[in-house]
Image: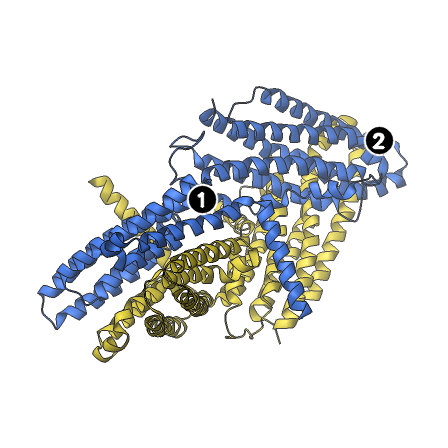
Chain colours: A blue, B yellow
């Protein structure tokens, strides 16, 4: 009994934490409740009951399956459902009519084979990436509606009346979904994507600073070390961001203009920026590996490179943060050129510092030098990789300047 | 007209290519067709028509939404649907009974508020990761069934009869799905995951060899260069493999034992191996950046390191391929220890080679040495990163030995 109780409480705590982290999730739950209650109230109102009540089932079903977290998701499913239901219904009624004209024996054969062929073809088409991204749900509904109508034993004139009522209820369901979704604290997929990209940029900037700091400060035990190394792990969220970025960009395409986003907002640019950021994150993962490697460079090496590396990482993270804030505000940043210039200066300083390293080595006694160089390998990548990072950064910079030019004032 | 025709033909070609690449996708389409035709034939058979025919709608709907590409997906949806429908139905009938006892005025209030509360709570619970992974579809069906039953104006005894018929048709639908899914060329999610992991390992091995070869052979224009650099880009598929691995591992949990996989196959181990492989792929992305960097190391440097680097990459890729084939055959490999030993030898050789580098530098004239070292930075990471790769490789090795011990003979 105690384990069950403790499990329930830990589950409750987890749920509470999710709700506290993102209250919109709680609000989403409430919104679904509102939409469903509206449909059921609709049903209880007598005059409407007599009209479309018999098919209220379809309105409820529509609300349950169409209501999504973001407006884009809601629109995607709503439009797909509406279009798929009407085209599949029309097609099925047409085939029904042909079948009914061709005699009682052939009728089931025509109907069954049409269901077989269309269902097979439609299911296969879901494997084509473009179609899957935009019409996956629509195809399911298409197969469903077509088979239902084709299989049903009704006559054509009955079917037409039924189709009318059914499309009407589905339209009501979709309308209720959209109204609740847009009016009650809407969550726009586009905005989510926008925030995700700028948040990821901030995370990268923090991580970059944190990683380099961790590396050079490792021996001086600083207080608050945990928070520091936690900060430096933020890039890990960026590593696997592709799936969520792709899906949000897909949904954002369905959304009309809202807020600062125009109707034809360049969502695909966000994906490019996202890819550039992931590339940065991959480099940082490699950098992280160097930093946590067992073999460490000797102290005097580190000291030699510390300041300039710190300056470079600070410069890079400043550039990232500036881009992130310019993405957030959708304005071209004025200081970005200056910051990029500073970062480039830091790169050159690092190159100078590295150039002077071998001199130090030749000056020190041969044996010590040799020992040092074995370990130098583990120091050098740490610095050269941060150089490497600068390259994708440039890509990101140029892409982002493009985006902010297209988007912002 | 011409553009439409050319679009249609290019679309047809694309679809044909997808079908040719993976005939199972075509077979899946045919399987859905078979399942739907079976249901419709079921419907046309008169005696059955009189029994459950009126609810055949539910059987068709079940087949359309439950049928998935893999057996695991089919089982996941089928079990979720069955359990959710029955629990939600029972709960709704219970609340209906309570509401009907409490007077006509209070009845709609009780029903509406129960719909509101349950729908909100259930929708929110979908945000909890564990529940989302296992019961996402079940919760949708739970909300749907509960609202449908609660909203419907039927009396309790009518409801019970209806529920019986409906559950019966849904059971028929699920049974047809499972039979077709398992008997006609089944695709097991577990096997897919298994193959994906070993295929990704092969890709990593090929890429590693290819990348290092590309780097050191760049100047000698070899024939068949394109195929070589295509080979070396295979690791890019591994970078974003997390989503598909996670979903397949989730589905594989629902599958019973099949083929060489026991009932409690350690699917979570595959995820760990997958994570280790992704880490390798991140390092290779960084390595790729070094190789394509504009500044290249001077020839004599490259020559100095070429042989030992090639040996190391060959050794690593041999280890990867050996692990991959031992995963494929699910047998512990005997030669793996030898290969790992060879790889470690190569690592040590590389360390020796690197140690002798600075000596060469000091021997050459000062100016040349300086110029060389600027560029050395771009050579060194190429080799040190392949050293770095060895570490996650060890992780992968140890994990895989674990897996093969648990799984294999």
Above-or-below relation of A249 to A352: below
> Residue drawn at (54%, 30%), measured in percent from left and top?
A328
Image spot of residue A19 (x, y percent): 57, 49
Q: Which residue is mark 1?
A: A70
Q: Is residue B9 visible?
A: yes
Image spot of residue A21 (x, y percent): 60, 45
* Mark 1 in CB contact with mark 2 (< 8 angstroms): no
Mark 1: few/some/many CA within 10 Å (<14, 14-19, 20+)? many
In screen coordinates, is B123 left or right of A292? Answer: left
In three-dimensional space, the C-alpha distance between marks 1 and 2, rounded to whole angstroms, equals 59 Å
Chain letter for mark 1? A
Element class at badge 2: helix
Q: Quadrant of the N terminus of chain B?
A: top left
Judge by depth and name the residue closer to the eye, B181 or A259: A259
Q: Nearer the viewer, mark 1 or mark 2?
A: 1
Image spot of residue B200 (x, y percent): 55, 57
Q: Quadrant of the C terminus of chain B?
A: bottom right
Element class at badge 1: loop
Above-or-below relation of B1 to B175: above
Q: How many marks?
A: 2
**Residue B104 quadrant:** bottom left
Judge by depth and name the residue closer to the eye, A216 or B129: B129
> Residue drawn at (73%, 44%), measured in percent from left and top?
A290
Chain letter for mark 2? A
Image spot of residue B76 (x, y percent): 46, 66
**Residue A143 quadrant:** bottom left
Above-or-below relation of A402 to A138: above
> Residue drawn at (56%, 56%), measured in percent from left and top?
B129
Labels 1, 2: one chain: yes
Q: Which residue is mark 2?
A: A360
Q: Is residue B332 visible?
A: no
């Amino acid at each position: 009994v105690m384990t069950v109780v403790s499990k329930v409480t830990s589950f409750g705590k987890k749920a509470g934490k999710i709700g506290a982290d993102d209250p919109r999730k709680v609000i989403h739950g409430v919104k679904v409740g509102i939409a469903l209650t509206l449909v059921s109230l609709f049903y209880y109102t007598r005059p409407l009951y007599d009209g479309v009540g018999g098919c209220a089932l379809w309105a409820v079903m529509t609300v349950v399956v169409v209501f999504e977290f973001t407006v884009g998701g809601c629109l995607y499913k709503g439009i797909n459902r509406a279009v798929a239901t009407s085209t599949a219904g029309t097609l099925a009624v047409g085939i029904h009519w042909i079948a009914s004209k061709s005699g009682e024996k052939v009728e089931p054969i025509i109907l069954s084979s049409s269901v077989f062929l269309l269902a097979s073809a439609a299911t296969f088409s879901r494997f084509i990436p473009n179609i899957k991204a935009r019409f996956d749900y629509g195809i399911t509904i298409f197969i469903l509606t077509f088979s239902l109508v084709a299989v049903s034993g009704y006559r054509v004139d009955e079917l037409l009346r039924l189709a009318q009522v059914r499309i009407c209820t589905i339209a009501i369901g979709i309308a209720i979904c959209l109204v609740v979704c847009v009016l009650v604290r809407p969550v726009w997929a586009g905005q989510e994507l926008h925030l995700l990209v700028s948040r990821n940029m901030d995370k990268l900037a923090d991580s970059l600073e944190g990683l380099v700091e961790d590396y050079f400060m490792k021996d001086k035990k600083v207080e608050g070390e945990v928070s520091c190394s936690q900060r430096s792990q933020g890039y890990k969220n960026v590593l696997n961001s592709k799936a969520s970025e792709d899906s949000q960009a897909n949904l954002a395409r369905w959304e009309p203009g809202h807020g600062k986003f125009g109707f034809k907002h360049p969502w695909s640019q966000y994906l490019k920026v996202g890819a550039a950021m992931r590339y940065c994150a991959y480099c940082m993962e490699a950098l992280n590996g160097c930093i946590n490697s067992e073999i460490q460079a000797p102290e005097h090496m580190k000291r030699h490179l510390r300041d300039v590396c710190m300056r470079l990482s600070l410069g890079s993270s400043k550039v990232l943060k500036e881009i992130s804030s310019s993405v957030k505000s959708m304005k071209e940043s004025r200081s970005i050129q200056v910051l990029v210039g500073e970062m480039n200066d830091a790169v050159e300083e690092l190159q100078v510092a590295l150039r002077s390293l071998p001199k130090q080595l030749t000056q020190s006694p041969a044996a010590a030098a040799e020992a040092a160089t074995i370990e130098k390998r583990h120091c050098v990548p740490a610095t050269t990789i941060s150089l490497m990072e600068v390259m994708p950064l440039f890509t990101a910079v140029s892409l982002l300047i493009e985006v902010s030019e297209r988007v912002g004032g």
